[in-house]
Amino acid sequence: MSITIKKFGQTSNKEEIKLYTLTNRNGMSAAFTNYGAVLVSLMVPDGKGNLDDVVLGYGNLEGYLKNGPGLGSFIGRHANRIGNASFDINGKTYDLEKNNGNNNLHGGSIGYNKMVYETEYFEEEDSDTIEFSRLSPDMEQGFPGNLDICVTYTLTNDNELVIEYLAVSDQDTLINLTNHSYFNLAGHKSGTILNHKMMIDSDYFTPTTDDLIPTGEIRDVTGTPMDFRTLKTIGQDIHADYLPLKQGKGYDHNYVLKTSKDEIIKVAELIDEGSQRKMEVYTDLPGMQVYTGNNLGENENCKEGAAYHPYDGVCFETQFFPNSCNLKEFKPCLFKAGEEYDYTTVYRFTTI
């Protein structure tokens, strides 16, 4: 295992930003920057051993300073949507930025992917780990409590990228952290992922209003285009005459997982038959937003001159349910003062 470090740019505040690359014995590598704790690239071998970058991203820091689609991003303090951009804790109402219509999305326009992090890294025989941490001060983005945050990325010799989220607040607050990487197992600039095969081990999803706020209903996927319990191509039903798909312009929905806090289990699988790459997703979080890049548009500064279009990548955002803070039907992501937020997600790569 090895870790290399190089300059990645400088912010307007003259903060030096670096790129950290972790490489395992199989040649697989993962690169991160301390600006946003972002996953910049993920080089994964195909069935013939050839490496390609399987996450969408930018070629320089300038791209990540804008990063409207949230490519590779660490998301917080609250991933996904909060209806009416407000919530109550202990009888007090907190108002957030309305950056997604009338709602709050991913914490606001200045999210955790726009912060600079303290960095530590550790080289082991069988794995490398990089740790990004910072203090999110009380009322940052409108959320109460000083929140100590740490996200660690570990690359193992088993071709696993392990993401562990740790956080604790000095006040009762909402915590809902995730990763917003867009995966394309044929390579980040190979075009559509509609021919990828996907499996989601979930019997239910959470339908939404037209502005993608869950209604509180938990709906059975049986007999609907939302059913991925057996492998099928992403594109098979994506344009079906089904209201949730029309609302999201494709898949942009939270799936109810069969997880418990006691065990990290497999919840999804993605296969590209052309490259023979397979990715498995494991987590102990209760939900997962599956997003097929429906709103991707051509972006400047993309890696290797790529221009991304709708359906060029798919996200597996493990999380608490969207708007759980306002819906009694959902387990809330409310954490008491001093209560530790500790969850893990694993992306494991093999070949078919």
Image (spheres, helix red, strand yellow):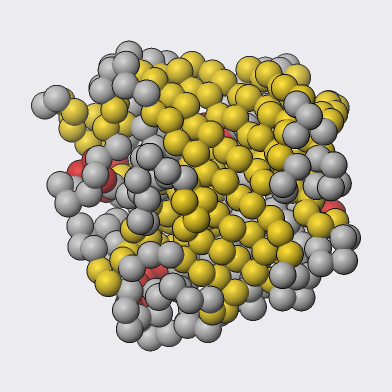
- The answer to whether residue 325 is left or right of residue 157 is left
Residue 275, placed above or below residue 23? below
> Which image quarter: residue 128?
top right
The residue sitting at 75% across, 26% down in the picture is 124
In the rendered image, the quadrant that contains the N terminus is top right
- The answer to whether residue 105 is left or right of residue 92 is right
Q: Residue furthest left?
A: 91
Q: Is residue 91 visible?
A: yes
In the rendered image, the quadrant that contains the C terminus is bottom right
> Which image quarter: residue 193?
bottom right
The residue sitting at 53% across, 34% down in the picture is 164
Most foreground residue, 199 or 20 = 199
Most foreground residue, 88 or 174 = 174
Residue 343, placed above or below residue 216? above
- The answer to whether residue 126 is left or right of residue 295 is right
Q: Position of residue 78 (x, y in %)?
A: 39, 37
The residue sitting at 43% across, 30% down in the picture is 342
- The answer to whether residue 44 is left or right of residue 173 is right
Q: Position of residue 338 (x, y in %)?
A: 32, 16
Q: Position of residue 215 (x, y in %)?
A: 21, 59
Residue 244, placed above or below residue 71? below
Q: Is residue 249 visible?
A: no
Q: How many marks?
A: 0
Q: Position of residue 121 (x, y in %)?
A: 71, 22
The residue sitting at 20% across, 44% down in the picture is 326
> Which image quarter: residue 113?
top right
